[in-house]
Structures are given as C-alpha cells and as structure tokens.
Amino acid sequence: MKICEICGLPKDLCVCEEIAREVQKVKVYTVRRRFGKLMTIVEGIDEHDIDIRELTKTLKSKCACGGTSKKGQIELQGDHKRKVKEVLAGMGFSSDTIEIK
C-alpha cells in the first residue's frame, strides 16, 4: 500500500488533490495563433498539486478537441472557454475561482 507524502494517508484515501482543486485560481482565455486559429489557454493550475497531464486528457475528451500541456498551461484547439469552466467545476474546482477573460 502506498502512502501519500503530503498528508500521510493511503493513496486510496488521499484528499490532497481535492483540497488543492478548491483553492486554485484558474484563468481561461483564448488567443489567436497562426492562420487565425483560436486556442483556449487554461493557466494557474499548480503542477505539483494536480496531475496536469491527466487534467489535459480529460479536458480534451470532454471538449472533443486536440491540445497539449506546456509550461504549466493547458492549450486546447478552438474556443472552449464556457465548456472548460463547466468541466472544471464538475471536477471539483470552485467556479468562483475560475476566471474567464
């Protein structure tokens, strides 16, 4: 059985990630890239507390788009600001701390 290094509970019962989700200040905005394509950028998520690769994978599947995670940001192809906020709120992030620009 693996033990969490932060809280000392077994990994199955660990609540560190859930607590971290509630206090994150997430910014969601779009930028224009090459050839006028829109990219939705999600930033402000601490990589040490939350598995950003798993979060990227979930957002890509829920938004039905391509994307990647670079430099602590999640980049999604297309304009998905509203959908990202809904998905993040459903995953336990506080909707008050998700800022859409």
Image: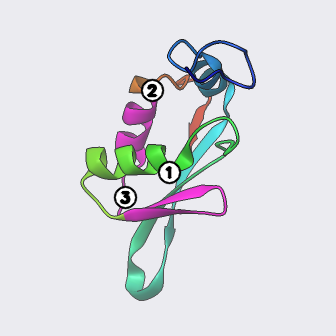
Residue at coordinates 37% horizontally, 58% vertically from top-left?
Answer: 79
Q: Which residues are magenta?
A: 67-88
Q: Residue furthest front?
A: 1
User: Of marks 1 and 3, which one's residue comes earlier in the chain?
Assistant: 1
Disc 1 residue crowd, few under 14, some 14–19, many 20+, Cα 10 Å: some
**How busy is the neighbourhood of tag 3: few (under 14 within 10 Å), some, or many (20 plus)?**
some
The first of marks 3 and 2 along the sequence is 3
- Location of mark 3 (residue): 79
Number of the label disc, if any, that sits on residue 89: 2
Q: Label 1, on which residue?
A: 53
Is residue 4 magenta-colored? no
Residue closer to the observer: 34 or 88: 88
The answer to whether residue 45 is left or right of residue 69 is right
Q: Element at badge 2?
A: helix
Residue type beneath disc 3? Asp
Q: Which residue type carries mark 1? A: Arg
